[in-house]
Image (cartoon, rainbow, N blue to C red):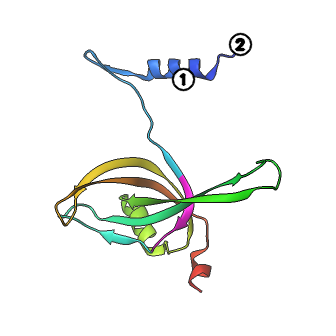
């Protein structure tokens, strides 16, 4: 069987899976985020202007690398960078479970999409916010043990 390179198959998939509306071509795209980290604070649930409630928490991810003479050998220093992500959960079942069982320090796997938005703060200054809209949360630590 003759195999084509992945990029050719992807191009064919996108071309054949595109929907045409008049002269406008709507191609498939992807906005997916996968995070594995620890919760920074207990979640809060908010509801603004009668809209659907949302559970919000922060998640820390760490990036580590070795600096110095050789990255292969044990020589050199280890550097680390922590990145904080704002997680929002809107799906009703997942939102409620996340609010009830996620605790500070818990290790989670979060899947979702990235969302860039703007808001006006209390001082009437426009700010930008990056949020992960979670559609899947997997608990990697036992909540009951963490409470004890």
Residue 136 in the image: x percent, y percent?
Answer: 48, 55
Residue of label 1 = 10
Q: Secondary structure at mark 2?
A: loop
Name above or below for residue 74 compared with residue 13.
below
Left or right: where does residue 68 sit relative to residue 117?
Answer: right
Residue 124 in the image: x percent, y percent?
Answer: 16, 61
Residue 99 in the image: x percent, y percent?
Answer: 41, 71
Q: Which residue is pictured at 34% across the width and 48% down the height?
A: 116
Where residue 38 sits, quadrant-wise, is bottom right
Question: Which quarter of the figure is the N terminus placed in?
Answer: top right
Question: Which quarter of the figure is the C terminus placed in?
Answer: bottom right
Residue 68 in the image: x percent, y percent?
Answer: 73, 51
Q: Secondary structure at mark 1?
A: helix
- Report the front residue among 2 and 81: 81
Left or right: where does residue 130 sit relative to residue 71?
Answer: left
Mark 1 Cα shell of 10 Å, populated few (<14), some (14-19), many (≥20): few
Q: Which residue is pictured at 56% across the width and 83% down the height?
A: 147
Q: Which residue is pictured at 39% across the width and 25% down the height?
A: 27
Residue of label 2 = 2
Looking at the image, the residue that sits furthest to the top is 2
* Range drawn in magenta: 35-41
- Report the front residue among 70 and 99: 70
Disc 2, disc 1: CB below 8 Å?
no
- Report the front residue among 21 and 148: 148
Nearest to viewer (mark 2 / mark 1): 1
Residue 122 has which mark? none
Looking at the image, the residue that sits furthest to the front is 69
What secondary structure prevails in the magenta region? strand
Where residue 41 sits, quadrant-wise, is bottom left
Q: Is 28 inside the magenta-drawn segment? A: no
């Amino acid at each position: 069987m003759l195999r084509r390179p992945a990029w050719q198959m992807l191009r064919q998939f996108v071309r054949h899976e595109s929907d045409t509306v008049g002269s406008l071509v709507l191609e498939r795209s992807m906005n997916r985020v996968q995070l594995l980290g620890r919760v920074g604070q207990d979640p809060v649930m908010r509801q603004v202007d009668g809209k659907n409630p949302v559970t919000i928490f922060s998640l820390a991810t760490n990036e580590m690398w070795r600096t110095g003479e050789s990255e292969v050998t044990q020589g050199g220093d280890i550097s680390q960078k922590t990145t904080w992500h704002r997680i929002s959960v809107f799906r009703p079942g997942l939102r409620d479970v996340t609010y009830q069982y996620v605790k500070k320090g818990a290790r989670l796997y979060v899947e979702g999409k990235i969302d860039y938005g703007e808001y006006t703060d209390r001082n009437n200054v426009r700010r930008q916010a990056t949020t992960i809209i979670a559609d899947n949360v997997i608990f990697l630590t036992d909540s009951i043990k963490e409470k004890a």
